Image: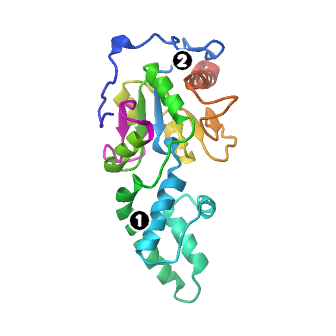
């Protein structure tokens, strides 16, 4: 797995022609017009980092500070309605705090909790029990066998993000990892496109949050959104609860179809 900058896994001459690995009956709407040349995952599409990562580290921070707080899966799922981690901590403390000094106490505690969690995150995350989403490996190996390069993007630091990617999908199957160490700002998907050497028209993004979906769409990418309670989202090529599924697993063939269909509907000629 490469660092910032493109690190090719396969020689170009070994790349199959587009369509070589399509399965009978699974062809995209117009594969010749919109070939899929790369897949870019947001890190939270590989695993549920909120519940299995951030929640676990926050609980460790609460314990380290001697606070009688512990976020269950159910409680943290409720708090995910708030988009910012600091807001979640504040909401939890305000729920438990009463009295005229509450505001001052909450502000002080929020700062301390968030700072402690940030400090502990790197040393805990690789041992937190984060597991890949069911069905992820099948899709990643589809891409690997078909010589479709895969990149992973994240707002996290390389020091923990790259080893976590290896832990989730294995060595040698991801071509590049774009982290907060590589750029400042939200343009991580465009950065990944540059490293892979493909245009936005040629890649499919897969994200695990609506924030990631917005960032991928802003980079001009057709995007699949993976979320626990899948619902409609007009800006996504598809919204799914996961990769696995007896009737319709998310595999490379279906990614090709979704990618082609998205561009059928969003190309200038379709307007």
Measuring 62% from the left and 64% from the top, which residue is drawn there? 75
Where the N terminus falls, by quadrant?
top left
Q: Residue at x 31, y 47 (%)?
A: 181
Magenta includes 208?
no
State the SS at label 1. Answer: helix
Compared to residue 201, the image places residue 181 above or below, namely below
Mark 1 — residue? 117
Q: Are marks 2 and 1 in contact (CB under 8 Å)?
A: no
Q: Is residue 72 above or below residue 174?
A: below
- Helix, strand or loop at mark 2: loop
Q: Residue at x 55, y 34 (%)?
A: 223
Give x and y (percent) for residue 230.
Answer: 67, 43
**Where does the image place residue 189, in percent across and percent down from the top left?**
43, 37
Q: Is residue 187 visible?
A: no
In the rendered image, which quarter is residue 163 located in? Answer: top left
Which stretch did the figure color magenta? 168-189
Q: Which residue is mark 2?
A: 34
Q: Residues within 10 Å of mark 2 (few under 14, many from 20)?
A: many
The prevailing secondary structure element of the residues shown in magenta is loop
Is 169 within the magenta? yes
Query: Does residue 64 lie above or below 266 as drawn?
Result: below
Total of numbered circles in the picture? 2
Q: Percent position (x, y) of residue 36?
A: 50, 21
Asked whether, in this view, residue 183 is left or right of residue 229, the answer is left
Residue appearing at x 54%, y 70% in the figure: 70
Q: Dot 1, crowdedness within 10 Å: few (<14), some or many (≥20)?
A: many
């Amino acid at each position: 797995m490469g660092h910032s900058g493109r690190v090719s896994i396969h020689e170009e001459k070994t790349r199959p022609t587009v369509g070589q690995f399509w399965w009978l009956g699974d062809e995209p709407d117009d594969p010749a017009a919109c070939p899929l040349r790369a897949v870019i995952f947001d890190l939270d599409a590989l695993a549920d980092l909120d519940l299995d990562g951030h929640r676990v580290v926050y609980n460790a921070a609460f314990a380290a500070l001697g606070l009688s707080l512990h976020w269950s899966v159910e409680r943290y799922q409720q708090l995910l309605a708030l988009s910012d981690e600091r807001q979640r901590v504040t909401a939890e403390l305000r729920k438990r705090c009463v009295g005229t000094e509450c505001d001052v106490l909450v502000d002080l505690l929020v700062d301390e909790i968030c700072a402690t969690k940030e400090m502990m995150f790197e040393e805990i995350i690789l041992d937190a029990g984060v597991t890949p989403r069911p069905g992820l490996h099948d899709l990643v190996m589809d891409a690997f066998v078909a010589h479709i390069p895969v990149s992973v993007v994240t707002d996290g630091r390389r020091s923990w993000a790259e080893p976590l990617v290896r832990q989730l999908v294995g060595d040698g199957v991801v071509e590049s990892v774009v982290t907060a160490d590589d750029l400042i700002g939200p343009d991580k998907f465009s950065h990944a496109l540059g490293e892979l050497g493909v245009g936005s028209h040629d890649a499919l993004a897969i994200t695990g949050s609506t924030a990631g979906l917005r960032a991928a769409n802003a980079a001009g990418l057709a995007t699949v959104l993976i979320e626990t309670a899948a619902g409609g989202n007009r800006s996504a090529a598809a919204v799914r609860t996961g990769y696995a599924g007896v009737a319709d697993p998310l595999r490379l063939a279906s990614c090709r179809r979704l990618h082609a269909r998205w561009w059928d509907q969003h190309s200038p000629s379709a307007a």
